[in-house]
Image (tube, rainbow, N blue to C red):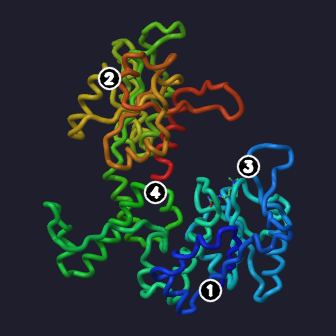
Amino acid sequence: MTFEVVTIFPEYFESPLKVGLLGKAIERGLIKVRLHNLRDFATDKHHTVDDKPFGGGEGMLFKPEPLFRALETLKKQPPKPRIVYLSPQGRLLTHEVARELASCERLVLLCGRYEGIDERIREHFVDDEISIGDYVLFGGEAAALVLIEVLSRLIPGVVGCEDSVAKDSFADGLLKHPQYTRPRNFLGYEVPEVLLSGNHAEIERWRRRKSLEVTFERRPELLKKARLTEEDRAYLKHLKRERLRLYLALVHYPVVNKEGRKIASSFTNLDLHDLARVARTYGLKAYYLVQPLSDQRAIMEELLAFWLSGPGARHNPDRAEALKLVRLRRSLEEVLQEIREAEGQPPVMLATDARPLRPALPYEEAGRIIRSGQPTLILLGTAWGLAPEVLERADHFLAPIPGALDDYNHLSVRSAASIIVDRLLREVV
Ligand code: 4G0
């Protein structure tokens, strides 16, 4: 494989191309890297490669002519190269994109600087635009080096042991399991016993499970594309069951009314059924209804009895299965006490509020808390929302569900709750 690097700083690449396995691969002729100084393709006496953007604004751009000449020169030599431009606007480099590019015999890597290159070169002379991540570098050189390293590893013979490339993170779409070397005891920290057992089948199984665990905790979205066996799937199912300790509480007191006064709200039958079915569908451990008013509680008790042991249970057992998760409690205090007793630790409290006291916790981060196995309680307010005394006790706030087009944001609490639970468990269920 040949890389033709077009850059104004060829010297940037000197030592990276000399050292380690990449240096070896170049020495052995497995890959070739040719450096081309863009300035050599400029025709004026100062070898100018950049100019100011039309329309004004910050910074400089690479002008089209030297780039065009460099590309024409390289395109004249066989085999036909693929022209790759490294830029933050490119498609993200992943293991999959790398495999696709590794099938090319010859790549031209265009390294931009400043604010990039003239759009006409990008549009008419570039085959592929690649970004190594969502951040901006001074120039495309470091990105080109990353691409060279990633692709080189995929070329047979570059990494001594083919097996180790196959077992790398991402080769099968999973993150790598933890690894240990001597000493067995380091500052009192031990190496997992199984790795010392000499039982290779057992060790392989442990490693696979750790891979699945690490991926589940940190990058659950990778699991969708990962190559998983039936045994992997069974283990993931077990992990989810063990880790998901999620509770929902629909608070009817203390909440506030339109005027901001503290009130108790009345039950809504729709909330009872719909949120119980959400709880059962998403594997929540319980759905609490917080209500101190005894006449309200009496109505709810009657409804629950109808579905759990009365005619409703005989007629519709699926509904009973959902409503079994409902716990009618007098106060939030009771709820917290009960979860603390069941889980051995107090839950992380996630409150929903239209105007949170503190910046909202992104849903992905809340998802990570849940996947880590910490018991978690989602607090939902009725009426005009949770009273300040409840909000103050929350560990984090979840951002309200925004409308798609404007500020209109009047979802029912059960609609919002469904969306919230789905966002939190998006990658998990
Ligand atoms: C093109 C690549 C190139 C445009 C290059 C900057 C990050 C990457 C450059 C710009 C780079 C990456 C618009 C600032 C050079 N930075 N993520 N810097 N702009 O792959």
Q: Nearer the viewer, mark 1 or mark 3?
A: 3
Tell me how far mark 2 sits from mark 4, CA to CA. Answer: 33 Å
Q: Would you name the residue on which mark 3 appears?
A: 59
Q: Is residue 357 above or below residue 365?
A: above
Q: Marks 3 and 4, how far apart in space?
A: 37 Å
The residue closer to the viewer here, 298 or 388, is 388
Front residue of 330/174: it is 174
Question: Residues at badges 2 and 3 in contact (C-beta under 8 Å)?
Answer: no
Q: Nearer the viewer, mark 2 or mark 4?
A: 4
Q: Is 127 located above or below residue 310 in the figure?
A: below
Give the mark nearest the N terminus, 2 or 4.
4
Q: Which mark is residue 32?
A: 1
> Helix or strand or loop: what does disc 4 sit on?
loop
Mark 1 or 4: in front is: 1
Q: Earlier in the sequence, mark 3 or mark 4?
A: 3
Circles 1 and 3, Cβ within 8 Å, touching? The answer is no
Q: Is mark 3 within 8 Å of ligand 1?
A: yes
- Which tag is nearer the camera, tag 2 or tag 3? 3
